[in-house]
Amino acid sequence: MIGDLSTKKMVVVDPQRDISSYLSTAKEEGMKITKVLETHFHADFLSGHLELSKATGAPIGYGDKATSEFEFEPLADHSKIVLGDHVTIEVLHTPGHTPESVSYLIHVDGKPTSVLTGDCLFVGDVGRPDLLSSAGVTSEELALQLYDSLHNVLLKLPNETIVYPGHGAGSACGKAMLDAPSTTIQEQRDFNYALRPMTPEKFVEVVTEGLASPPQYFHHTAAANRQKHSLLDESTPPPALSYDEVLKMKETDDILFMDVRDVNETAAGHLKGSVCVPLHSRFAGYAGAVAEPDQKIVIICPPSSEVETKIRLARIGFDNVVGYLTPQIEQLLVEKPELSVDFKRVSPTDFDTWKDEKDVQIVDVREVGEFTGGAVPSAVNLPLSGIRDEEKQKVLPENKGTPLVVYCKSGVRSSVAASFLGNLGYQNLSQITGGYCAWKEAQKVEE
């Protein structure tokens, strides 16, 4: 949120889908939201531009290379948005991550002070240029545009300019970004691997190598950001449904149970046929890995978290939450113990001895880059981000009775993956407690 106190005008850049925090902040500060600005069509989250424009009457602004189903103000390169006597926003066309990408340079009292770079420049990284490869634009073409945007636009700014990127560590929109909210042009000039002196051709090679496959939900979310879609109701909880009511629904609809409790709770017992995606994790990305975008979802959650879960799914455009399960899952599994499944957990210190006594397949669900950097011997790699891909599933044994030992870095992704693999028919599932990090540490102790 960027505002000028002289006029009480404010803009919001790249808003999340649930907009109540923006409205309350504007009210508290006595400001009026006059524009909703977007840096590009996002693939990793469904923006709140439609919701915020509807609530405030503010027009939506995109770079003038954008096309969409809804009306927006096309923003020309170097056009200015004057908020008041002190603050002016300059639009900088910075294509590369996507063709329509822009950055917003903030001038205070006539001096450029900071820049919102969206997914063009991150702390320690740059935006990946491959997300539109299925839409007729090659990653090489976009990478060359990205090189030009970085070297001939952003790096031309004063070195002291503060950079506010669109993401931090963990986002799939880059491959090596650091977890910091801001940086400076000078710091990135000095330390960002992608900004070292190199030819455009070498830059293309550097930024396109080693990219993990984008999460499967990205295509759905990127398309939804261009479309007119239903607005989020962030206050009404989904309806309560009994297990028998859901079974009746499943006779005609594809219903997915999603259990968002803590990994320790779901490991001890969860509903047969459910996927386990802990709410207090990188929830959106993990949920998007194991659920189909248009699939109807019944959530299994702790008390009073029904609305939060619905909103967290809506942030990636998964709007088909048809209800939440009642009574609480613990009571249901006591009443119907035949519906309960659990995961075995093997300590890292006992793992080597344990696996030698069994004919097991070890499955590493980390990303390819993590796997190639070190893995448990004889493990196959099936990244969680691509676990719904039938081609990638071919690394799994055909015999569904084969015991699978699933692990990730620390234990969260493996819990999500194990529940999904159980739904594929693999019922003999185990996890390494603490994941690869704990296993690696145990090897050091033994040495």
Image (cartoon, rainbow, N blue to C red):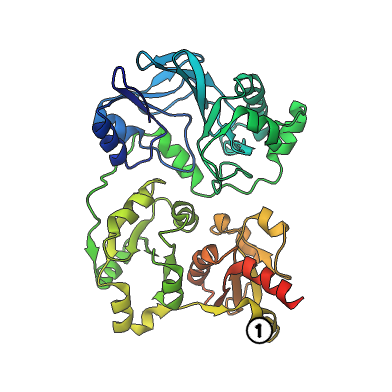
Q: How many numbered callouts?
A: 1
Q: Which of 373 and 110 is in front in this view?
A: 110
Residue shown at 42%/67% (left/top)? 262
Residue shown at 33%/65% (left/top)? 301
Q: Is residue 74 shown above or below 360?
A: above
Q: In which quarter of the image is the N terminus?
A: top left
Residue 325 location (% of width, % of height): 28, 67
Image quadrant in which you'd find residue 26:
top left
Q: Which of 237 and 291 is in front in this view?
A: 237
Q: Which of 106 and 339 is in front in this view?
A: 106
Residue 395 location (% of width, % of height): 66, 65
Q: Name the residue under label 1.
A: 354
Q: Is residue 253 shown above or below 342?
A: above
Residue placed farthest to the bottom in the image?
Answer: 357
Say whether residue 444 is visible.
yes
Say whether residue 230 is visible.
no
Q: In which quarter of the image is the C terminus?
A: bottom right
Could you tell me the amino acid type at mark 1?
Answer: Trp
Residue shown at 47%/54% (left/top)? 282
Residue shown at 45%/25% (left/top)? 67
SS under mark 1: helix
| Number of residues whose C-alpha sits closer than 10 Å to that of mark 1, classed few (under 14), some (14–19) or many (20 or more) | few
Residue 316 location (% of width, % of height): 42, 46
